Each structure stands twice: as C-alpha cells, then as structure tokens.
Amino acid sequence: MTAKTLSRSLMIAFASAGLALSAPAVAQVDEDAAKLLFKQNECGKCHHPSQNKKGPSLKKTAKEYKGKANAEQEIMKHLTTPKKVKLDDGSEEDHRVVDSKDQKALANLARWILSH
C-alpha cells in the first residue's frame, strides 16, 4: 500500500467516524415493555399496529408524526392529557390516559408507536 493510498484511507476512516459521532443518538425501544404498557392500558381496544379500529392504527399515527422534531413529546402529551378525540364515524369520546407516571416508560411507549 502506498503512502498516498494509506493517507486517503485514513482520511475516509476519520471522516466516517466524525459523521457517525455527530449523528443524533436515537434511544432504543424496549418493545416488550411498550407492548405491556399498551396492553395494561387497554389501548388495543381502539388501536391496532397496522389496521384502523375505533382509533387510528399505530402505523397511521407514526406516519402522521414522521419527520417532526417533537413527535415523541407530542405523543407523550396525547397519552397523558385527558381530552376528547374525534372518531372516524364523526363521534367524539374521551381518550383514556395512560396510567403511568414513569416518564421513561411513557417515552418508550411513544417511541414504540413511532416505530410502526
């Protein structure tokens, strides 16, 4: 290997490492914990991962929030703030609040929803 080739290889390696380190860290999703919280709060009565039920599918929700910088926070607010929601048939009902004060668990649930 020539000095020029070695120098070029090192430059590419350092540039790649710099890009990797500068990328924002994405928190991992504990899928099992999110599914358990989803089940415990009976979210599945109205929401399904891929099909609309009484409420939108998780896939539809994830698509709606895709690319929004504050998506996780917006979903957490929706999960924890009592309010009326409009259903597909035009009626309204109270949206259940997730029964958890654990911010990490709520954030994990929000990330799981966004992962669909």
Image (tube, rainbow, N blue to C red):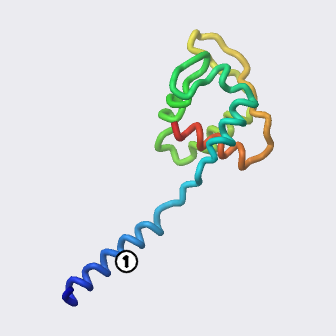
> In the image, is 13 to the left or to the right of 113?
left
The image quadrant that residue 54 belongs to is top right
Label 1: element kind: helix
Is residue 68 placed above or below 85 in the rendered structure? below
- The residue beneath circle 1 is 14
* Quarter occupied by the N terminus: bottom left
x and y percent of residue 112 in the render? 59, 41
Is 79 in front, or is 8? 8
x and y percent of residue 59 in the render? 51, 31
Is residue 59 placed above or below 9 in the rendered structure? above
Is residue 84 placed above or below 67 in the rendered structure? above
- Residue at 59%, 11% (x, y): give it: 90
x and y percent of residue 91 in the render? 64, 10
- Residue at 71%, 30% (x, y): give it: 39
Question: Crowding at label 1, few (<14), some or many (≥20) Cα neighbours within 10 Å?
Answer: few
- Residue at 51%, 26% (x, y): give it: 50
The image quadrant that residue 46 belongs to is top right
Is 50 in front, or is 84? 50
Is 49 in front, or is 19? 49
Identify which amino acid the numbered label 1 is placed on: Phe
> In the image, is 59 to the left or to the right of 80?
left
- Residue at 37%, 70% (x, y): give it: 16
> In the image, is 91 to the left or to the right of 58?
right
Tell which residue pokes out farthest to the bottom in this image: 3
